[in-house]
Amino acid sequence: MNSRIGYIAFNTFREAVRDRVLYNLIAFAVLLSGAAILVGEISIDIERLVVVNLGLTAVSLFGVVIAIFIGIGLVSKEIDKRTLYTVLSRPVRRWEFVVGKFFGLTGTLVVNTFFMALGVFLALLYVAHKFDKMDVWVLVALYFIVLQFLIVCALALFFSSFSTPLMSAVFTFALFIIGSLAEDLRGFARITHGAGGWLATAIAYLVPNFSALNVISQVAHGDPVAGRLILYNSLYAVLYSAMAISGAVLIFQRRNLK
Amino acid sequence: MAAIEILDLEKSYLVGFWRKRPKLALRPLRLTIEEGEVFGFLGPNGAGKTTTLKLLMGLVFPTAGTARLLGFAMDDPRVKSQIGFLPEQPYFYDHLNARELLNYYGQLSGVPAKGRAAKVERMLGRVGLSDSAGVQLRKFSKGMLQRVGLAQAILHEPKLVFLDEPMSGLDPMGRREVRDLIQQLRSEGKTVFFSTHILSDAEALCDRVGVIHQGELRGVGAVAELTSKRQGKIEILFYTQGQEQSVPPALISLGAEARVSGNMVNATLPEEQQEAALEVIRRERLKLISLTPVRSSLEEYYIEKLQPSEGHTEPGHEDDSRKEDGPREESRRGVGV
């Protein structure tokens, strides 16, 4: 990696940590330990199912909220506070700044997810008293959640490269919701004909397919995840993020920093 | 080689919600600054000083024209490692402390890892922040932030330094320190381009100044020459005799304008009346303290350039210190809105 991108990424990560972003882990820990204790008391043989479902959904939602709320401020905050001026007056290209910011935020989310994943496995151990072979699929689900974060970060960065923080948050969150229903949208597109069908198909393939990246329910039931899906999802997330980041770079390259 | 060559740089913004119309922020600007020069860019708030600096830094893009910095096109990445920039009212990453911030900027500027820490410490000492190096910037005062700003601008030893209102918000001591720092940069052979509306700072520091108003460069001149021009008047300082605290009527009849303070009189009168005035002082047995020709001040030049003139609608300024034999710098016809 270009060293300047690394420096910017590390500074972004350090900023997030010092802005107490990781404090969300406390809320997560309280939620999960409370749930685990409750589930341990009342569930009959579905403890694992409940803990995996609840834990992974919480990991996903906490991460998405962080990705959106930090991601939308990554560029606009630097412009508003004019910290960007002293960065771009150095031998730093605008695309390096955008990419550095992206890696910094995804790095923060990976670290955050790592600690939340530890929490999920501890809760699993608490309710099941041992780990099972099928728990390895929980790791795959966590990997898919991280891929979701990549896309959400990239989208937040894309929207914030030309829009206000509030509108960027609305756009990104809306895309996350629509993307989570992408499979339903594709199903709808298949049964719709004419111009409406074309439009539905276009939208269905344009929005990020977050539903393909959601295997929480599947792994909660102990079902395996196909290797091919892991490969396709990895490629899809990388390409979609790269596309969104490229869009952000293209817009930011031409932007006047008033 | 010229350190800065601004070639008809022009900037307009589109304003309005429904019907966008262009608003000219900077009329075509043509200006050359030599290496080793300290150049003051003067003008009231909103004159176009910051826009010019942002254009040169690549933060906004010109509508027309270009510039060359140290011989490179202004958007050439190679030039960026040789320039330093202090924005107006700087604000930095407040989660960092001064040492971390300078280290970060050193990394981005390509300062080698070996020796970077020592360089950062030296720079903190140079701007008087060694004792506060570990304090997060969110706890810094405005003056301290300005010092950090100066430190980051010169950390990587740039050849060319741009400072946007470097004295803004500083107390007299802070202003003195910044002045000293700019003078040090001059003695090191750096080129300094700074914008200000504090004329005393410009007069004390600059080799040349340019006055910009309403996005138009109104004039450029060498400070030494602008402030040495005689105005055709003399100023006489003398003591009145005994308890009498009035100006001799003979002096008034020569056209003197006088101010009396205790038994001291300060009289200004036309230069051609010098001999006659001295004769009056001798005759009245007054005690002469001094006689000096009245010279122009930078303030007068500045005010003169800010006045609306005939040339305002067809902008064209000239280097006022080089009217006789120097090269002319002229801005071409501006585009109105």
Image (tube, coloured by chain):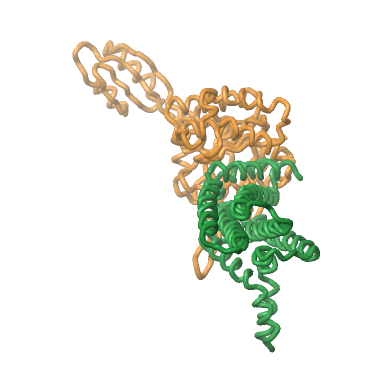
Looking at the image, how many numbered discs can be counted on the residues?
0
Task: Judge whether residue B269 can be spotted in this image.
Answer: yes
Q: Is residue B4 above or below residue A247?
A: above
Specify whether B67 is left or right of A69.
right
Q: Nearer the viewer, residue A124 or B118?
A: A124
| Residue B8 x %, y % | 64, 50
| Residue A126 x %, y % | 59, 51
Q: Residue at x 61, y 53 (%)?
A: A120
| Residue A125 x %, y % | 63, 51
Q: Residue at x 57, y 58 (%)?
A: A58
Q: Nearer the viewer, residue A117 or B221?
A: A117
Q: Residue at x 45, y 27 (%)?
A: B295
Specify whether B269 is left or right of B186.
left
Please state, as top left, top right, bottom left or bottom right, where the N terminus of chain A lies in the image: top right
Residue furthest to the bottom = A194
Q: Is residue A242 above or below residue B170?
A: below
Query: Which chain shows up in green?
Result: A
Q: What shade does chain B have?
A: orange
Task: Judge whether residue B320 can be spotted in this image.
Answer: no
Q: Is residue B143 above or below residue A31?
A: above
Q: Quadrant of residue A92?
A: top right
Residue furthest to the left = B243
Residue furthest to the front = A44
| Residue B169 x %, y % | 44, 35
Q: Nearer the viewer, residue A102 or A145?
A: A145
Specify whether B42 is left or right of B155.
left
